């Protein structure tokens, strides 16, 4: 049957359903995680997130930009993805301004996944990650794989509509 020459109601309905299916499939593949670390020194921790992304088949892109030292670069990264279906995972320890900065300047979800050296480092520095100002919803997930699983579940909510 030549669908494009015989535009009956059936043909239009068929094309509409197929077009909607293509949209659902392509939006699934467009979901991605944008990883922003505060420093290149965070690479070993970022690699754990990248590995989990690969395991779950989620596209990811990594940037290194400090909210303290390179705020304009962070803003440019956030702006670049404003119209895409993304979730930001921020990787910053010590005085973690990155997570709050991203959450305050983007309409996208932000998961903070701080790279603590050990338990003592966590006890000393966790507060800069979990204490956010009002209306700055940066979520905190300590394990890299769990951060990716959380992102996957958020993406899955969109797919089940």
Image (cartoon, rainbow, N blue to C red):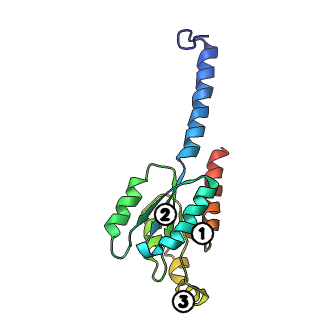
Q: Earlier in the sequence, mark 1 or mark 2?
A: 2
Please tell me which residue is depicted at 58% across the width and 88% down the height of the picture: 123
Residue 144 disc label:
1
Please tell me which residue is depicted at 63% across the width and 62% down the height of the picture: 150
In this picture, is 41 found above or below 109?
below
In this picture, is 150 found above or below 130?
above
Q: Nearer the viewer, mark 3 or mark 2?
A: 2
In the image, 7 versus 94, the foreground residue is 94
Q: Secondary structure at mark 3?
A: helix
Residue 121 percent coordinates (x, y): 55, 87
Q: Earlier in the sequence, mark 1 or mark 3?
A: 3
Q: Nearer the viewer, mark 1 or mark 3?
A: 1
Q: Decide: marks 3, 2 in contact (CB < 8 A)?
A: no
Residue 82 disc label:
none
- Dividing the image into 4 quarters, which one contains the N terminus? top right
As measured in the structure, the alpha-carbon distance from the residue carrying label 1 to the one carrying label 2 is 11 Å
Q: Which residue is labeled 3 in the image?
A: 124
In the image, 134 versus 18, the foreground residue is 18
Image-quadrant location for residue 102:
bottom left
Q: Decide: marks 1, 3 in contact (CB < 8 A)?
A: no
Q: Earlier in the sequence, mark 3 or mark 2?
A: 2
């Amino acid at each position: 049957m030549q669908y494009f020459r015989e535009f009956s109601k059936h043909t239009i309905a068929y094309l509409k359903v197929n077009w909607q299916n293509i949209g659902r499939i392509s939006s699934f593949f467009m979901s991605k995680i944008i990883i922003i670390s505060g420093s290149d020194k965070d690479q070993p921790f970022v690699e754990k997130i990248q590995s989990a992304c690969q395991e779950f088949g989620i596209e990811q892109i990594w940037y290194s930009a400090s909210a303290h030292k390179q705020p304009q670069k962070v803003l440019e990264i956030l702006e670049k993805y404003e119209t895409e279906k993304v979730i930001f995972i921020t990787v910053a320890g010590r005085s973690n301004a990155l997570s709050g900065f991203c959450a305050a300047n983007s309409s996208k979800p932000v998961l903070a996944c701080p790279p603590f050296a050990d338990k003592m480092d966590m006890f000393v520095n966790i507060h800069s990650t979990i204490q956010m100002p009002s209306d700055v919803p940066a979520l905190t997930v300590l394990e890299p794989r769990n951060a990716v699983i959380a992102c996957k579940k958020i993406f899955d909510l969109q797919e089940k509509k």
